[in-house]
Amino acid sequence: MLLFASLFGASPASAQFWQCAPYARMISGIDIHGNAGTWWGQAAGRYERGETPSVGAVMVMKPYGKMRVGHVATVSSIVSAREITVTHANWSRRGRVERDVRVVDVSADGDWSRVKVWYAAQGDVGQTSYPTFGFIYPKRGAAVQFAQAGGATLRGAALR
């Protein structure tokens, strides 16, 4: 019985098939459920929302083209005013987690309303620019608990 449990027990995050929303919820502590494209509306009145990235915030991408249900990704670092890195799941590697992925703001006004995201097949940001709703911020005063995922731990920096 013990052998069976050890062979078929819980597997590490890196071995699981992840969707973006459950993974973002797990590592950000933002308790919203449902498809990524619904997160922005669900956050209204529950979480602060805005157009400025911060570590631990969740970037919410609108449904667009083949991305019919949107996408969410947790900000892992701020590189510059127009570049961040995110940690997310089920983007360029189906069901897999990708850490510290490059995201570039390509919006005309520098307001993060349109982004390009690193894509594994190209080894750089893809050709498509995606519309975003903006960023959902974890609750003030609440310690964001970044979950250990596949051996790497994200650490929260100053929150809004």
Image: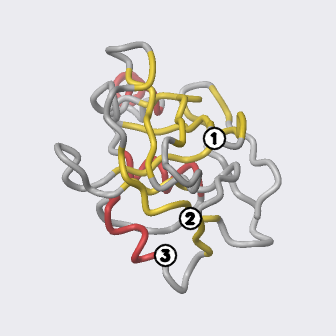
Nearest the viewer among 12 and 84 is 84
How many angstroms separate mark 2 from mark 1 (CA)? 18 Å
Tell me if mark 1 has few (under 14), some (14-19) or many (20+) residues whose alpha carbon lies within 10 angstroms of its own: some
Q: Looking at the image, what colour scheme do you see? A: secondary structure
Q: 57 or 16: nearer the eye?
A: 57
Q: Is residue 54 above or below residue 79?
A: below
Q: Secondary structure at mark 3?
A: helix
Q: Are marks 3 and 2 in contact (CB under 8 Å)?
A: yes
Q: Amino acid at mark 3?
A: Ala
Q: Position of residue 93 (x, y in %)?
A: 32, 25
Q: CA distance from mark 3 to mark 2?
A: 7 Å
The residue that disc 1 covers is: 82
Residue behind mark 2: 136
Kind of element beneath mark 2: strand
**90 shown above or below 20:** above
Q: Is residue 113 left or right of residue 147?
A: left
**Residue at position x 54%, y 42% from top?**
105
**Picture residue at 49% right of the left edge, 48% below the top:** 107
Q: Which residue corresponds to mark 3? A: 43
Depth order, front residue of 116/6: 116
Residue for point 40% across, 37% down:
89
Answer above or below: position of 135 versus 67. Answer: below
